[in-house]
Image (spheres, rainbow, N blue to C red):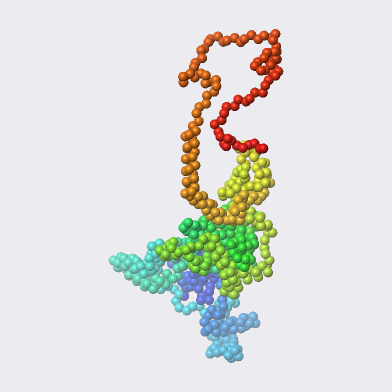
Amino acid sequence: MAELRLERGAVIDFHGRRYTCGGRGPGGGYMLAPHKGRTNQLIKPGAAFDALAKGKLVFVKEESDHEGDPPPELHFDLTALAEGERTLVLMRHYYMRRMDDYRREGGKLSEKAVTALAREVHTDYVAICRRHDREPPHKPMSEAAVRRWYRRWVNSGHKLISIVRDATGNSHSKLTTEQADALYAAIHDDYMDRRRISARHAHTLMTAKLNIENRAREARGEAPIKIPHYNTLLAHLDRVDLFEKLKARYNTQYALKVTRQYGITPPAIRHLERVQVDHTLLDIYVDFGHRTLVRPWLTLILDSYSKAILGFWLTPDPASAESVMQAMRMAILPKNVRELGGDAEWHWPMHGLPSELTLDNGKEFHGKDLEMAAAELGFTLNFTPPRKPWFKAQVERKFGEINRSLLAQLPGQVFKYEPEKHGLDYPHLSLDELKRIFLQWITTVLHRTPNENGHTPEQLWLESVHRHGMPGGGFAQEYVEMCLSKTCAERIIHPNGIHLNDLHFNNEWLSRLRNELAPKVDNRKPAVTVKWSAADVGVIYVLHPDTHEFFRVEAQQEYAHGRSLYNHRVVKREQRLRRKASLQDACYTDAALALDQAIKELTDTRVAKGKKLGTKVARYESGKPKRAARTCTPTPPEPFDREEPIQHLDDDVVNTSTGEILTAKPTEAKTPPSDKDIEDFADDLEI
């Protein structure tokens, strides 16, 4: 029987696909690791020889281009054999050791000498079997068998697998070349196609093609081709790599998803060693106010070691880098459950700086703010491969647990497969109520639920903290809040401060900065870089352009201190609605109408008439102006007598030499009367 010998590490092309040989197994077949795919192939030496003869197997001389994991190291163990074969292998092993001792002593391999040695070894082995209560062999091994097994034993380097009997039977294919080609075409051309036809349909097409070929062969006087059975086609289909079949019938992503390795998330040995973050659209509707229902987004941060939730962020807006940074803010800083909206007895000790943050390739995770925060706080961003969520399967699985264990009990659940159940005829929770329920579920249920080993997330966390301590960079809370804040465009410093989110921010240091920067700009409107957080809209951080350091500025509106952006929007919406309702109130509209009528009456009764000056009144006679006669020559002035230096002008004594008024009575200011009432003047005098 012709066989083909393949060395471990040999690279071959088998049926158009490249493999690396992983060595020979107990059954005598060769393990082939595919370069592109997930399923290993096992080929018998006889089948490999037939494939080589037909040109289906080609040796590749260049180095392996295998990009996946290296071929597995094959190890042999007697437990892989049946009980009868295991007993024979132990007997052959005893014979081989005695043959090694015999050859070291200079023994010959002649027929007579080996036969005598076999009888002696048989007698000793029977005694050993009786001492161990095992059934001894009935007769010694023949001289030819001893020499054959010893030759294989020496050639293999004294490996136990060499004295295992190969699989019996004919490993050569019984199919003719035409039949093999027809099966190959039915599998790779018809079955492995995007049409995704069934195996039965592929066999029907193969039968039709062979019938056409047989009619042509019959006309030429040649023997017809026997049509392979349907079970033969199924047997050959089972030998095709599952990854290759799914890739050809669907696509590469689906093939990777189905044939992927499970449980490949790297393990963690302590808390905060690896933290996973992701977000999802929750399967629940919440009441945003005024019968407006929205599905909130949840951003979750999970510790890979303890499976405890470190932080979360609930928002009606789509997930963004800001959501990730707010969830990171809750995860890193110590938590005050009362400030988060819970009760004092709800214990949540999980917090701290992670060593590695695992996230996917979403656009919101590639922002500069998150990258700068990671650099400033000292944690690493680890991005998983695209479209492979199983690299952070723990947080993905936690989303399913939240939907099944918590949201399924709440009103407003989303029925994905029964949309007719959606409606507004049952109560819905507000976002704050959902946040409080979620907080209570985390602290009182999830962190106290034991895993398959009987340990709760809270116990694992506290034990790890006791063994390894609490990692961290020693950063102040205000510095962490500033690093995890969002950078916005430059804002102008107005005389009353910075305007952001319908709030005014100002303090003494901001006023000093404005006075310092205003003379340096043309329009006297200096602009600065500002960072703010959606978790607390009542605080911003302003960058000093000279020192390149941020300082804290609080909002002038005290109600905004400690309030989230969502709550601030609700407050502003209620203020607008309250103002709109007040403007539409009947008392207000009646008062506005009465005031308008009063102003109109005053305007009609007191129409301002045109006032004429005294010099212009004399020009009018009988309603027409009197035109003065014009002369071409000007009237000369009267002569001035210098001999009379003092003249009396009415009651004033004037010195004609100097024009100085020597004595004068006080004159009254002739101010034209005003049309305003005394009540209309401002009261500027103080008594």
Q: Residue at x 54, y 71 (%)?
A: 23
Q: Residue furthest front?
A: 651
Residue 677's spot in the image, x, y percent? Answer: 56, 34
Q: Residue at x 54, y 60 (%)?
A: 432
The answer to whether residue 650 of the structure is visible from this angle is yes
Q: Residue at x 58, y 54 (%)?
A: 534
Nearer the observer, 315 or 394: 315
Compared with residue 122, is residue 427 higher up or lower down, i.e. above or below? Answer: above
The answer to whether residue 541 of the structure is visible from this angle is no
Q: Residue at x 67, y 17 (%)?
A: 652
Residue 453's spot in the image, x, y percent? Answer: 59, 74
Quadrant location of residue 176? bottom left
Quadrant in the picture for the C terminus: top right
Nearer the observer, 6 or 66: 66
Q: Is residue 657 left or right of residue 264?
A: right
Residue 450's spot in the image, x, y percent? Answer: 58, 73
Residue 35's spot in the image, x, y percent? Answer: 51, 64
Compared with residue 582, is residue 279 higher up or lower down, i.e. above or below? Answer: below
Nearer the observer, 611 or 357: 611
Nearer the observer, 157 or 318: 318
Q: How many marks?
A: 0
